[in-house]
Amino acid sequence: MRILVLGAGAVGGYFGGRLAGNGADVTFLVRPKRAERLAAEGLRIASRFGDARLKVNCVTQDHAKPDYDLAILTAKAYDLGSALDAIAPALGARGHVLPLLNGMAQLQALDARFGRERVLGGVAYIAATLAPDGEIRHLNDFHRVVYGPRAAAQKPLCEAFAAALQGVNFDWKQLDNVEHAMWDKWVLLATLAGITCLMRAPVGDIVATGAGERLTLALLGECAAVARAEGCATGQAALENYRGLLTQKGSAFTASMLRDIESGGPTEGDHILGAMLALARKHSLSSPTLEVAATHLEAYAARRRRESSAK
């Protein structure tokens, strides 16, 4: 199986690097400057699960050929359009896409571009960042990929990918109901991103306040209600786990969206919070905390646009 990974940033670089280190046939589709750096320094990973420095195969968009069976996509929502343009030449008419993206709205764009029969379902669980020196730094205690078919014809490809994953240095699971897992991740992420961005603080600082835990759990309940209304109810065991993660005293847990805000960059606010709120409204669900969190991200984006246009 020939695997193409779009980019060699925090998420794609981590999981693609682990696959390459395990002997899989992996190529990274990167910009010329990143290709030069990878050629000179290798792909570098710093993690509690083991550091790595790997010589990896790279290709730039101008030289990509339709040689790949599977493209792993880890782009941010605001880069999705350009990401699809980048991988399309490398997939030709037969290659499949495994999106490890946040939320659910990306499936519509992917299905429209490649056809539903070529788009798998998937979700990644990791906190990582690409440092200025080019090193990928793993920030938490888990690194997991869940994936699976969205159509019966995709099952053989999923099995072939499972073979490539054997012995890899991260956790993984193949699921037939993978879209349910994607919803579960969205519920957690919308809550985590919404509350940490709104409060500009990690979980531990939020729950150290008088109302922080109550507001966090209120937001979790509202997001879970949306998933339930959409037919993908979050299981009780998962909800208990989320409550623990989101209310742990002293926790430094934050969403990468908070780091995006603190650096003045674009966010996936509309894709994660705005889309969740739109579904809440579709089902006439009471969602006051979600509305505040989504509006906060919307206002941040509006201010960023205004200040950018004034320069």
Image (cartoon, grey):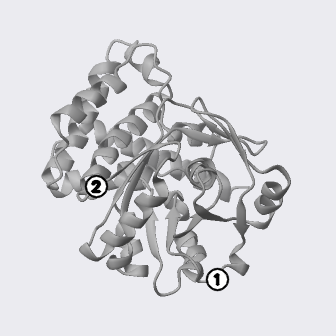
SS at circle 2: loop
Left or right? Give the position of 200 relative to 188. Answer: right
Please tell me how many numbered marks the rendered image carries.
2
Residue 186 versus residue 200: which sits nearer the camera? 186
Q: Badge 1: few (under 14), some or many (20 or more) residues near its Cα, within 10 Å? A: some
Among numbered discs 2 and 1, the one appearing first in the sequence: 1
| Picture coordinates of residue 100, whole percent (x, y) | 45, 56
Q: Is residue 45 above or below residue 147?
A: above
Left or right? Give the position of 85 relative to 296. Answer: right
Amino acid type, mark 1: Lys
Q: Badge 2: few (under 14), some or many (20 or more) residues near its Cα, within 10 Å? A: some
Q: Distance between the residues labelled 2 and 1?
A: 30 Å
Residue carrying label 2: 175
In the picture as drawn, the residue positioned furthest to the right comes out as 40
Quadrant of the snapshot with the C terminus: bottom right
For image coordinates 52% across by 71% down, the residue present is 81
Can you tell which quarter of the image residue 50 is in? top right
Q: Is residue 207 above or below residue 108?
A: above
Left or right? Give the position of 311 relative to 37. Answer: left
For image coordinates 37% across by 45% down, the residue present is 294
Q: Residue 106 carries which label?
A: none
Q: In this view, does 108 lie above or below 228?
A: below
Residue 248 versus residue 6: which sits nearer the camera? 6
Q: Which mark is residue 65?
A: 1
For image coordinates 50% across by 29% down, the residue present is 200
| Picture coordinates of residue 170, whole percent (x, y) | 49, 42
Amino acid type, mark 2: Leu
